[in-house]
Image: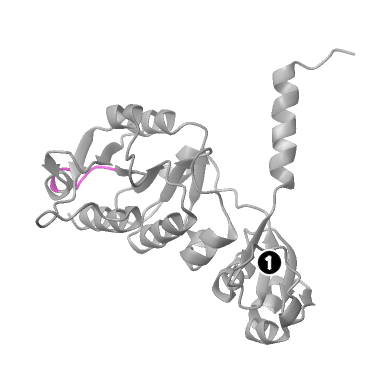
Amino acid sequence: MTKKPTWVIDKEKAKRASAAETVWLFGLHAVRDALLNPARARLRLIVTRNAADKLADAIAIAGIEAEIADPRKFTAPLDPGSVHQGAALEVKPLDWGSLEDVAMAPGMGLPRLVLLDRVSDPHNVGAILRSAEVFGARAVIAPARHAAPETGALAKTASGALERQPYLRVPNLGNAIEALKNMGFVCVGLDGAAEIDLGVVAAELSDRPVAVVLGAEGPGLRERTRELCDYLVRIPASGDFGSLNVSNAAAVSLYAITQA
């Protein structure tokens, strides 16, 4: 019998590990939206009696049997301090398909994307997903490493957007930017030290597919990411005020490029 190459064995192990990965979502809104999402693989639902009553319609639609927990001894394996509101749902991460699948998915208007370079705070990413949904972005894209994974905290902050707004993790963000440029996207990086205002570039690109690229607060965009962007722009600020939170910057950027 021919022995499999090491890289094949490693790839198969990674695939099995990914298939075995599960996420605990918590909070009434996040759990309800996941129960109503037909694309979500649901494994285990733990609720208090009060939460079960509030989620009764969604539980019936999902066809899942709920485990009733004592509110004083909530048994779901959540981090201490998680505001679960008496509801927790174990799920498989969503599979949004390939980069091309999400970037070129049919939708209203020209394609708009948000790319995140090492944005690791789940609350920021959750808020960005909400803004992306509001402004009609096709997807939020981040590297598989050094970025916020799909977690209960992210889902709760996203307030349901995680179930509807593609959040794609790619092996290498720079390679993803190059691939998007080959698809016809113009990549616009946010940089507080840039000399061009976001509004000026947004007006010039009103008829082009655009990907907005944002870096982590503090370090900002990595060098290669900056070099790959077609434009580096700033959000003009009044006086000596510092930079916006990355989730606020994402919302402002999306508004600018969708309204230009």
Q: Position of residue 80 (x, y in %)?
A: 64, 65
* Figure quadrant of residue 107: bottom left
- The residues colored magenta run 203-209
Q: Residue 195, percent across and down? A: 12, 38
Rendered residue at 53%/39% (across/down): 144
Q: Is residue 258 magenta?
A: no
Establish if 80 lies above or below 230.
below
Q: Between residue 227 and residue 35, name the one nearer to us.
A: 227
User: Image check: 255 left or right of 32?
Assistant: left
Which residue occupies the extreme left position in the image?
239
Residue drawn at x 69%, y 53% is: 22
Identify whether 9 is placed above or below 122.
Answer: above
Q: Is residue 110 above or below residue 229?
A: below
Question: Residue at image x 26%, y 40%?
Answer: 188
- Residue hosting label 1: 89
Considering depth in this image, is 121 or 102 the residue closer to the camera? Answer: 121
Quarter of the image that includes the C terminus: bottom left
Residue lying farthest top? 2
Q: Position of residue 243 (x, y in %)?
A: 23, 52
